[in-house]
C-alpha cells in the first residue's frame, strides 16, 4: 500500500491540488455570487448620498440642488408644499356634500375628507412628488405602504385639483408603486416580494430626489477610494456618461423619459451604463411621433426627428446640461441648435425664414420648432370642471410647425418687436 501510494504519490498530490483549487475556486465564485446577491437586494448600502459628493464636486452640487431633478421628491415639510392651506383656499369640493380640506395642525399637514360637514377620513402629507413646475402630488404612509393622496396641486391654475388617475369622488386608495418611485427618487428599498400588491417600502432606506447617483451609479466605493487616496487625481468606481455609448446615454434618460415602459425586471435594477431593453419591454410600435404623448416620452419624440435620425451624435445631453437649472433659457437652447444649423457647419441646413428676418427670432428657435403642446398624462380635474385640463410641455418632435410659425409672426407684427419666452404664454 505504502509503495503503492509512493508510486502514485505525484498523481495523488496532483488530484488533491486540483480538488483544492476547485474548492477555492467555487468559494470565490460563491463569494462573488453573494456579493451580486446583496447588491440586488440591498443596493442601498452602495450609495453615498449627494452631500458626500459636495466635498469634492462643490460647484456641480451647488447648482444641481436647484434642478427639478433634485427637487422632484422629498419630505413634505410645510415650506416645500406649493398649495395654499388658508381657510377658504384649502378646499377641493367634488360637490356641495363631498369635500376634501387641506389642513395644517401641530401634528402635521393633512388631507381631510368631509361628507355633509362630518369628518370621514384624514391622511397625512408625508412625501411630495413633483418640483412644482407643473404640479405636486403627495404620498402618505399607511404602515409600509405608500398611498397617493386624492388632491394634487396644479401649478398653472394655482389650485388644488383631483389627482390624476383618481375618480371624481372621495377616494384614498391609489398606491404609489415602485415604478413611480423609480422615476421620482434615486432609490427605494422594497420590503414586499416582487409580485405582491400593494407594494411595501422601507421608509428609512429611501433616497429622495433624482440625485447624482441616478446618473453616475451608486458612489460609496468612489467616495471611499478618493477620500482615502487624495493624491490620486483620476477617478475610480464611478460612471462618467461622457465615456458611455450614445445608446447607453439615451437609455440612462429613457428610464424616466421614455414614456410608459413595461418592466420585465424589478424596479431599481437598471442602472446607468446598462441596456434598457434588458429591463423593459420597449414598444417599438410607438415609432409614429403622432401617437407618442408629449408627457414623459421626450426620447420617443426626439428619436422621430430628423435632427436625431440624420446625425449619429445627438443625445439629450447635446441640448441639456442636467447639472444646471436651465428652464426657460431659450437663448442658450437656441445656441445649441446653431451648433449644427449654421452656415459653417458641415450639414449646413439653415433656417431660411429666420435668416430672412432681422430680429430676435434668431435667438428663439424653440417656439416655432419645439412648441408647447398639452400633455395627455399630466392632466387634472379642477373643482367644478367636467373635463380635465392639461399641463403644457415642449414637444421633442423637432420639425416645421406652420401654425406656430403663423402665430409667432403675427405676434411679432402686432407688437412690432422681438419675441421672448413670455410669447407662448400670452397667446395660449
Ligand atoms: C474625496 C473626494 C471625492 C468625493 C467625495 C467624490 N468624488 Fe467624484 N471624483 C473625485 C476625483 C479626484 C475625480 C477625478 C478628477 C475629476 O474628474 O474631477 C472624480 C471624478 C468624478 C467623476 C468623473 C469621472 C471620470 O471618469 O472622469 C464623476 C462623474 C464623479 N466624480 C462623481 C461623483 C459623485 C456622484 C460623488 C458622490 C457620490 C463623488 N464623485 C464624490 C473625487 C471625489
Ligand atoms: C430617475 C428618473 C430620471 C432620470 C434617469 C432622468 N430624469 Fe429627467 N426628469 C425626471 C423627472 C421625474 C422630472 C420632473 C421633475 C419635476 O419637475 O418634478 C425630470 C425633468 C427633467 C427635465 C426638465 C427640467 C425642468 O427644469 O423642468 C429635463 C430637461 C430632464 N429631466 C432631462 C433629463 C436628461 C437629459 C436625463 C438623462 C441624462 C434625465 N433627465 C434623466 C426623471 C428622470
Ligand atoms: C416613467 C417615469 C415616470 C413615472 C412612472 C411617473 N412619473 Fe411623474 N413625471 C415623470 C417625468 C419625466 C416628469 C416630467 C414631466 C414630463 O416629462 O412629463 C414627471 C412629472 C410629474 C409631476 C409634475 C412635476 C412638475 O412640477 O413638473 C408630478 C406631480 C408627478 N410626475 C407625479 C408622479 C406620481 C405621483 C407618479 C406615480 C403615481 C408618477 N409621477 C409616475 C416621470 C414619471
Ligand atoms: C440626470 C443625470 C445626472 C445627474 C443627476 C448628475 N449628473 Fe453629473 N453628469 C451627467 C452627464 C450626462 C455627464 C457627462 C456630460 C458630458 O457629456 O460631458 C456628467 C458629468 C459629471 C462629471 C464629470 C464632468 C464634469 O462636469 O466635471 C462630474 C464630476 C459629475 N457629473 C458629478 C455630478 C454630481 C456631483 C452630481 C450631483 C450633485 C451629478 N453629477 C448629477 C449626468 C448627471
Ligand atoms: C447634432 C446636430 C443637430 C442639432 C443639435 C439640432 N439639429 Fe436640427 N437637424 C439636424 C440634421 C442633420 C437635420 C436634417 C437635415 C437634412 O434634412 O438634411 C436636422 C433637421 C432639422 C429640421 C427640419 C426637420 C424636418 O422634418 O424637415 C428642423 C426644423 C430642425 N432641425 C430644427 C432644429 C432645432 C430648432 C434645434 C434646436 C432645438 C436643432 N434642430 C438641433 C441636426 C441637428
Ligand atoms: C435639440 C435640443 C434638445 C434635445 C436633443 C433634447 N431636448 Fe429636452 N428640451 C429642449 C428645449 C429647448 C426644451 C424647453 C426648455 C425650456 O424652455 O425650459 C426642453 C425641455 C425638456 C423638458 C421639460 C419639458 C417641458 O416643456 O416642461 C424635459 C423633461 C426634457 N426636455 C427632456 C429631454 C430628454 C429626456 C431628452 C433626450 C431624450 C431631451 N430632452 C432632448 C431641447 C432639447
Ligand atoms: C417664426 C418661426 C421660426 C423660427 C423662430 C425659426 N424657424 Fe426654422 N423654420 C421655420 C419654417 C416655417 C421653416 C420651413 C420654411 C423654410 O425653410 O423657410 C423652417 C425651417 C427650418 C429648418 C429646415 C430647413 C430645410 O431646408 O430643411 C431648419 C434646420 C430650421 N428651420 C432651424 C431653425 C433654427 C436653428 C432656428 C433658430 C435660430 C429657427 N429655425 C427658427 C420657422 C421658424
Image (cartoon, rainbow, N blue to C red):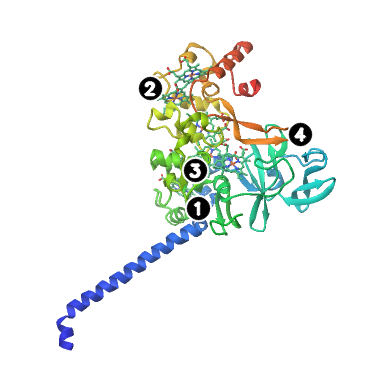
Q: Is residue 307 left or right of residue 427?
A: left
Q: Secondary structure at mark 1?
A: loop
Question: Where does ligand 5 appear, by image quarter?
Answer: top left
Q: Position of residue 270 (x, y in %)?
A: 47, 49
Report the residue at 80% width, 43% height from top. Answer: 98
Location of mark 2 (residue): 345
Whole-Å distance between the Cαs marked 1 and 2? 44 Å
Residue 275 screen position, x and y as percent: 41, 45
**Residue drawn at (85%, 46%) of the image:** 117
Q: Earlier in the sequence, mark 4 or mark 2?
A: 2
**Cα separation between marks 3 and 2:** 32 Å
* The residue carrying mark 4 has its beta carbon less than 8 Å from ligand 3: no
Between the C-alphas of marks 4 and 2, the distance is: 54 Å
Q: CA distance from mark 3 to mark 4?
A: 36 Å
- State which mark lies toward you, 3 or 2: 3
Report the residue marked by disc 4: 384
Residue found 51% across the figure and 54% down from its top: 47
Q: Which mark is residue 266?
A: 1
Mark seen at residue 255: 3
Instruction: Label 3: state its secondary structure.
Output: helix
Amino acid at each position: 500500500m505504502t509503495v503503492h501510494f509512493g508510486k502514485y504519490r505525484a498523481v495523488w498530490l496532483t488530484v488533491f491540488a486540483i480538488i483544492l483549487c476547485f474548492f477555492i475556486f467555487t468559494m470565490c465564485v460563491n463569494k462573488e455570487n453573494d456579493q451580486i446577491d446583496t447588491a440586488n437586494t440591498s443596493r442601498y448600502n452602495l450609495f453615498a448620498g449627494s452631500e458626500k459628493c459636495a466635498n469634492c464636486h462643490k460647484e456641480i452640487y451647488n447648482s444641481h440642488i436647484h434642478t427639478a431633478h433634485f427637487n422632484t421628491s422629498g419630505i413634505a415639510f410645510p415650506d416645500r408644499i406649493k398649495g395654499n392651506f388658508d381657510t377658504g383656499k384649502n378646499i377641493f369640493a367634488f360637490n356641495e356634500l363631498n369635500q376634501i380640506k387641506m389642513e395644517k395642525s401641530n401634528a402635521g399637514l393633512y388631507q381631510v375628507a368631509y361628507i355633509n360637514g362630518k369628518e370621514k377620513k384624514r391622511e397625512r402629507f408625508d412625501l411630495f412628488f413633483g418640483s412644482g413646475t407643473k404640479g405636486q402630488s403627495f404620498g402618505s404612509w399607511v404602515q409600509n405602504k405608500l398611498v397617493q393622496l386624492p388632491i394634487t396641486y396644479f401649478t398653472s391654475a394655482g389650485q388644488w385639483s383631483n389627482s390624476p388617475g383618481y375618480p371624481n369622488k372621495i377616494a384614498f386608495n391609489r398606491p404609489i408603486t415602485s415604478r413611480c418611485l423609480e422615476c421620482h427618487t434615486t432609490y427605494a428599498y422594497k420590503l414586499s416580494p416582487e409580485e405582491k400588491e400593494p407594494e411595501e417600502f422601507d421608509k428609512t432606506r429611501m433616497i429622495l430626489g433624482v440625485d447624482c447617483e441616478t446618473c453616475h451609479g451608486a458612489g460609496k466605493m468612489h467616495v471611499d477610494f478618493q477620500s482615502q487616496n487624495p493624491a490620486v487625481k483620476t477617478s475610480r468606481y464611478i460612471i462618467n456618461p461622457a465615456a458611455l455609448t450614445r445608446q447607453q446615454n439615451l437609455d440612462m434618460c429613457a428610464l424616466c423619459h421614455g414614456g410608459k415602459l413595461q418592466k420585465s425586471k424589478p424596479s431599481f435594477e437598471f442602472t446607468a451604463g446598462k441596456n434598457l431593453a434588458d429591463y423593459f419591454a420597449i414598444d417599438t410600435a410607438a415609432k409614429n411621433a403622432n401617437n407618442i404623448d408629449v408627457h414623459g416620452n421626450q426620447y420617443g419624440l426626439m428619436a422621430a426627428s430628423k435632427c436625431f435620425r440624420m446625425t449619429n451624435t445627438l443625445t439629450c445631453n447635446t441640448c441639456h446640461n442636467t447639472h444646471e437649472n436651465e428652464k426657460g433659457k431659450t437663448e442658450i437652447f437656441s445656441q445649441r441648435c446653431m451648433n449644427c444649423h449654421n452656415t459653417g457647419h458641415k450639414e449646413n441646413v439653415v433656417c431660411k425664414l429666420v435668416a430672412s428676418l432681422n430680429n430676435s427670432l434668431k435667438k428663439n428657435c424653440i417656439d416655432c420648432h419645439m412648441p408647447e403642446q398639452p400633455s395627455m398624462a399630466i392632466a387634472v380635474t379642477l373643482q367644478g370642471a367636467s373635463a380635465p385640463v392639461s399641463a403644457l410641455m415642449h414637444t421633442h418632435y423637432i420639425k416645421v410647425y406652420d401654425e406656430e410659425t403663423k402665430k409667432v409672426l403675427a405676434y411679432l407684427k402686432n407688437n412690432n418687436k422681438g419675441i421672448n419666452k413670455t410669447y407662448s404664454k400670452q397667446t395660449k
